[in-house]
Each structure stands twice: as C-alpha cells, then as structure tokens.
Amino acid sequence: MHTTPLELIYAKKFRLPHRSANIIQGINMVAAFARHAPHVHAALFFSDSIPDRNRYLRECYGVGLDALGDSFCASTRLRGIRYGYWLLKCMHAARNPVVYTRENTELERALLVRRLFRKKIRVVHELHKLGREGGGREDDAFMSLLSRADGLVFIDEGLREDVCARPGCRVPSLVAPSGVNLDAFYSRTIVIPGPTICVGYFGTVTPEKGVFLLAEAFSLLPGTYRLKFVGPVSDDVRAGIVHRAGEAGGRIEFAGYVQPADLPAALADVHISAVPSVSPDKFLSPLKLAESLALGLPMVCTPLEHLKRLVADGEHCVFARDLSPRAFAEALIALGSCPDLMNAMARSNRSHATSFSWDERARRILAFIEGIAD
C-alpha cells in the first residue's frame, strides 16, 4: 500500500470541440477523479474558434476548468508535440504516478515511457471493446500489450470474460460500466404518458446502431406513437429511416445534434427510450443505458446479454423477444399500453441510476488502483 497520494495522469489528447462519446466519458471521468483524488492531470486542446474555454466546457459538458484537476490547456496547434511533452513531464515529476489510458496507442506510449524512465509507474487501461477481430499475430500482439498493464478496467462483465479467459492475461481487473452525470440528468421532469406516446432515440444516428430496425418497428406501431431522434444524422441515413417507416414517416422528428448538457431538455417530451441493436454479438456501450436510467425513461431494448446483466426485464426495461423489427414493435406497444408500468419503471430507473454515477465509478476505480501491488 502506498503512503504517498497517487497522482493520476489521464493520458488522452482531448481535442475540443468534438462530438464523440469517448470525449463525453473522458471529461466526466477526469472531473469525477478530481473530486476523489488530490492530484489529477489532464491535457485539453481547444480550437481557436473557442474564445472562452471555461464557458464552453460549462455549456457543453456541465463542468468548468476548475473541476478538472490540474488541467493543461492549449491550442490544437502542435497538439501532438505539446501532448507528448506534457505526458513525459507528468510521468517524470509525479512521486506516485498512475497513468490511466483508453486507447491502445496511449497504453503503448505509457509502457514505453515507463521502461525508459525505469521508474515505478502504474499503468491502468480501460477497455470498451476488443482488439481487431480475426486472431493470429494481431490478436497475440493485443493480448501481449494488455498483459503488460498493471490493471484493466472493463465496462462490461462479458468483455472481461472474453479477455481474461485468454492465455497469458493474468492482470488484475475491475468491471465499471460507463457513468452518468446525475445532477444534470435528474433535471429532466418525468413525463406522464398521454394519448400520444413519444419514443426517443439519442446518440449518433447510424445503421450499425440499429436505427433502421427502429424505423421498421415504428412502421408497425399505431398512429398514437411518434418517434424522435436526437443526435447527428446524415442526409442518406435520414432518408433511409423515413423510407423504412413508410406511411409513419410523417410522425418522425429529427432534432439533430445537441450539446451533452442540453440532452435532458431535448428529451423533455419523450416517454420511452429505444435502445435497438442489429446483432446479438454487437457490443453496445452502457452510456446510453445509464443516461436513460438517470433521465427516468422506461426503455425498450433488444435482448443483448450484456444489457441483461445491467438492467432487469419488467423493472427497468422491456426486452424484445428477438432482434426483429416486429418483436421491437410489440415490446414498444406492450410498454406504451401500460402507463402504470411506465411510471413505476421511471421511478425504479432513477433509483437504479445511482449505481452508474461518474462519482461512484471514480471511487471504485481509485480503490481498485490503490489495491494494485507494485
């Protein structure tokens, strides 16, 4: 056990503005780590189009610079060089450094610097998916890389099982699903179902996320249902959704991209959160799940095994019987036709969301790191 407080270095080249989910997750994790650890370092690179960096962070993510620990801020110009120098400086100066990585390239970099410095530096890597499919040398190289980390953090139990069952991976590990900002998402008032039921989908609107399946399911719903997409969508995908919805296409609303902090307001009129998928083997990040819970939204989900480990059928959501559009439509009708269940599910989800808060996640990860032996 270390007596010197750890210094956590979140090794990621944050580039802002950026719409990806991993930026949302990363910034929230830095803020949560900073609330529970004395020394947290991060590097944020801002476009010159952002004149007030603190205001931008508050409006977009709901956190200011003062909440991000010992943040290094700079322009995106020469980002690679500045980031490399910042990382070397942090790893060299820290008395009890822990480098926290998410990308494989950052894990490789941290392990290389540790070897060059010949210094006790714990390296912890967070996994959201496996390496490249296909096995062979690439798979062996990926597993060799993971085996040199001091700790692994998985967002799903199934993902940990897939990795840790492989030969050569005996690294301490923790399962910690993606989190949610409870204060921001609790601001949404739970909507009482009326004669019209609004089904909402939020996130990037792409075919691999199951949006075409959702459109086909929506075409089978009664006229009392409407569908709302909140997230960036291309013209081709928008046209594909409307085409697949058929006559119901006129009841579809595309709200477009909204800042993460504005998501609760954008979903103020939604009654049911749709979480579709197109493959039983396609991993779906728990971020959307955690946010739906905190928003107090009953959910309809495709029956993915890793989702079943996080939420209960009939208590937090209704799982479709299979991955077909008809099964998803039947699940939406079953939930939408039972307002008492929707209200009970909304309350249950708000309570269940506390297990997915960024603060809870940060506390668990920090305790895990403290328990990793040198």
Image: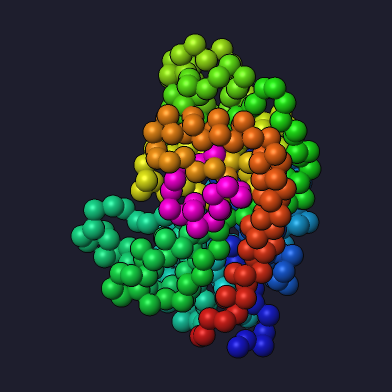
Is 147 above or below relative to 312?
below
Residue that appears at 50% across and 58% down: 309
Q: Is residue 282 visible?
A: yes
Horizontal side of 5 relative to 368 (left or right) equals right
Q: Quadrant of the N terminus?
A: bottom right
Q: Which residue is the extreme one toward the left?
A: 136
Residue 235 position (above or below residue 282): above
Q: Is residue 307 magenta?
A: yes
Q: Is residue 26 visible?
A: no
Q: Between 60 and 193, which is closer to the camera in this rendering?
A: 193
Residue 222 drawn at (x, y percent): 55, 19
Describe residue 370's horizontal placement relative to residue 57 as left or right: left
Residue 73 point in image, percent of width and height:
67, 52
Q: Residue at x 43, y 72 (%)?
A: 149
Q: Percent position (x, y) of residue 29?
A: 64, 58
| Magenta-drawn stretch contains 290 | no
Measured as percent of width and height from the top left, residue 145 is found at 36, 68
Q: Splitting the image into 4 quarters, where does residue 228 fall?
A: top right
- 158 on left or right of 29: left
What residue range appears in magenta? 300-316
Query: What residue is shown at x 46% (from left), y 82% (from top)?
Result: 118
Principal secondary structure, stretch drawn in magenta: loop
* Closer-to-camera residue (135/230): 230
Q: Which residue: 39% across, 66% down?
A: 161
**Colour setup of the view:** rainbow
Viewer-proximal residue among 4 and 194: 194
- The mark total stands at 0
